[in-house]
Image (tube, coloured by chain):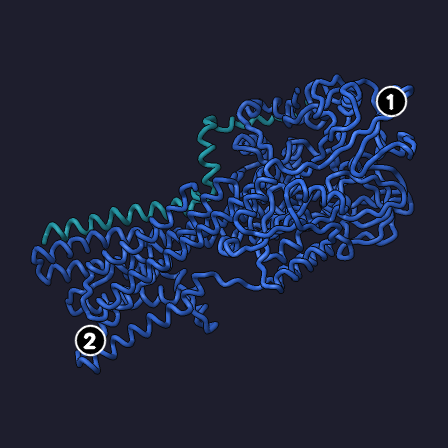
Chain colours: A blue, B cyan
Amino acid sequence: MASCLHCGQELIPGKEVDGQYCCAGCHAAHDLVQGLGLDLYYQRRSIDPTARPLIPDADESAKVDFALHAREKDAGEQALYLMVEGLHCAACVWLIENVLSRQPGVTYVRLNMTTKRLELRWKTGEADPNQLVHSVTQLGYRLVPYDPARIGDAVSAQEKELLKCMAVAGFSAGNVMLFSVSVWAGHFESMGWATRTFLHWFSALVVLPAVVYAGRPFFKSALEALSHRRTNMDVPISLGVLLTTGMSLWETIRAGEHAYFDAAITLLFFLLIGRYLDSRARGRARSAASHLLALAARAVTVLMPDGTRKLLPPEQVSVGSTVLVATGERIGIDGRVTDGVSDLDTSLISGETLPVQAKPGTQVFAGMTNLSAALRLEVTAVGEATLLAEIVRLMETAELGRARYAAIADRVSRWYAPVVHTASLGTFLVWTFVIGAAWQSALLTAVSVLIITCPCALALAVPVVQVVASSRLMRQGVLMKSATALERLALVDRVLFDKTGTLTLGRPDLLPGEWTQKDLDVAASMALSSRHPLAKALARQCPEAVPRKDVTELAGLGLESDGLRLGRRAWCQVSDELEGGEGPEFWLVGEGRKPVRFAFEDGPRPDSKETVSALKKMGLSMELLSGDRPFAVQALAAKVGLEEWRAQCLPSDKVARLEELKQNGSKPLMVGDGLNDAPALSAAFVSMSPSTAVDVSQTAADVIFQGDRLMSVAETLHVAKRASNLVRQNFALALVYNMITVPLAMAGHVTPLFAAIAMSSSSLVVILNALRLGRRG
Amino acid sequence: MTNLVMLIPAALLLGLLGLLTFIWALKSGQFEDLDGAANRILFDDDPPAKKPESNKDSEKS
């Protein structure tokens, strides 16, 4: 099938513009790109099917005034920070940057492909920000202004800080090794004390500032924990590093041989690497989900009593006034239809894929999209009183109620730190009072106990596994948003699925029935001229159909052509005696034809049955929670092999069910996609959401999986279980290592060389063990 | 001993140079968009010089 030259979408025969475009907007956009001499773009780009297609918005009515968002930059420049929606590939970045940089007055354009954020600067007064933005929105991208001080900058600043600390620690660790290796080599070659002390002083020179600088992330977090009378992993780390450095300095001053500068700084370096990778892996998932567009933020067209139209923000519309909703527009208020017949896309609110007919009297809610014809509404609720706001509130309450989960590393450090510190103190006391050694040498031994138990392996045990696991999952299109998601996933014992869009594809497919191939040909040839999901399903079933001419679409009813009608039962005047059935249907009627019924069904994802049996094999119980009617839910449950199901669940019912499960000590995983699932996603012990889900659900979910495959759920659980095994193994390894080395340290047999070897080997063992997770299987 | 006095500062200086370069790169934002930078290299042509006249024409068309 031919596709549109600009947006690449399939063309609907009979409705194309100029034979090559799907709409006038795409035509104009293509001309604009060509006019600027940038048509190389079309050769270079690769369309990402998961991104929004590049169809320019037809209605410019509900526009934001970008001039209000422009900020004064220095030297007569203004800047605008925008989030770009609809970015497909690097060619899009190239196109946007080129289009903007050719506008007069523009001084700087930079689009960050990773975060999808655009910075635009121009000379004050020489360009109109709305015009500049328009040149990009004309191409089909959507731009949303954001406040750079509020969004994401805190995270990226923290990451930058970690990277700087890591660089300083790495530099210092490398250079200190230079001196340390000389000292160790000199130990066997009888290096004189003068040279050794000389090298120690150099080490101190390099390490002391580096420890102060690069250790800050740990010191800060440790201080914070201590001031709240808690301990975390950073307390023993900070204490270990500081004591090691302090003692080494003391040894250097009195020209001793026990300087552990290298141990202190390598420890910091390793830990910073782990922490940086960890923060990056999660930062990526965050930027994928932070693409939150305010759902109701678009202006509403209000019809004033005197007949004029006025654009108002939704919260300023008063109840009882009349609002106009154009085709394709998202409704911003709750209301009742007073005039017009159309189809509404209610997927955001109810999770249902099929459009609902709207006619005078129908109750509509904010968040629904008007599909086929203009509607006139009487406002019944606005802002905080809308159903949409209600659902978001429900989600926030559920979020608050979620018990804070303590990461396993914090739980370990809770007993680890006291034990280590007691052991060290005990060593000191025994050496001074029982054995009667000088307090200086006793202190030396005590500190060496601290160094050798140094939490390197322990502190790396969790983050390394997390990094390996999340990068492996990321390769399979699964993004971890929460730091403890992996640990929580490993504990899951029950999986709850939403129906539409999660277990199913969220797209109706034609069912076999009493129609003939000929009927299908006729129906498909009419259906080709409609974008209604059922019509699309018909057309998909019969790709060779030739489009009919003179097909008229009657919003909310069906299609008509030459006395033939394809559409709703009532509109086709099919008598009630005719055998029907449940579920979505289209009827085809015409003079001298027997009425034919086409039934449709939202089919399960191809691998949902497989996934269910894989999860069963893992010993998990499962349940289907849906807002749909019982018969549809039961049919799907039977098809994919689920024994338990609940139908007609409201968002609050789903939350209640999850609370009930949690009360009974179960740890439920919720998988869902619709806005109606968002509260349940926040209420569950851990939650997953497909990347096709609405923004709010993606924000509520802990894990997001991409693509059509539901199997990702089983794979993620599998990886999580293995990861938690590896974490436990790592803790065991660290423990074994400590059990061997701590007695040696207590006995005072530890030298700097021994410490360096023991420490790095234990870290290496832990890292290598974690890497096993990277392999498939 | 004398060669140590020479070599150690030299080694430290070189290392420090590398560190400073890294921090400079970080400050100038070169680590901010790793995906974009990897792809940008494929589009070798710089944005052509501004041509305000032709620009206006094309917008009308």
* Residue at position x 87%, y 37% in the image: A341
Q: x, y percentage for residue A547? A: 76, 18
* Residue at position x 45%, y 48% in the image: A469
Of A51 and A670, nearer the camera is: A670
Q: In this figure, which residue is indicated by the disc labeled 1?
A: A564
Q: Residues within 10 Å of mark 2 (few under 14, many from 20)?
A: few
Q: Earlier in the sequence, mark 1 or mark 2?
A: 2
Identified by mark 2, the residue type is Gln
Q: Residues within 10 Å of mark 1 (few under 14, many from 20)?
A: some
Secondary-structure class at tag 1: strand
Identified by mark 1, the residue type is Leu
* Residue at position x 84%, y 33% in the image: A555
Of A119 and A384, nearer the camera is: A384
Q: Are marks 1 and 2 on the same chain?
A: yes
Q: x, y percentage for residue B10? A: 20, 48
In the rendered image, the quadrant that contains the C terminus of chain A is top left
Secondary-structure class at tag 2: helix
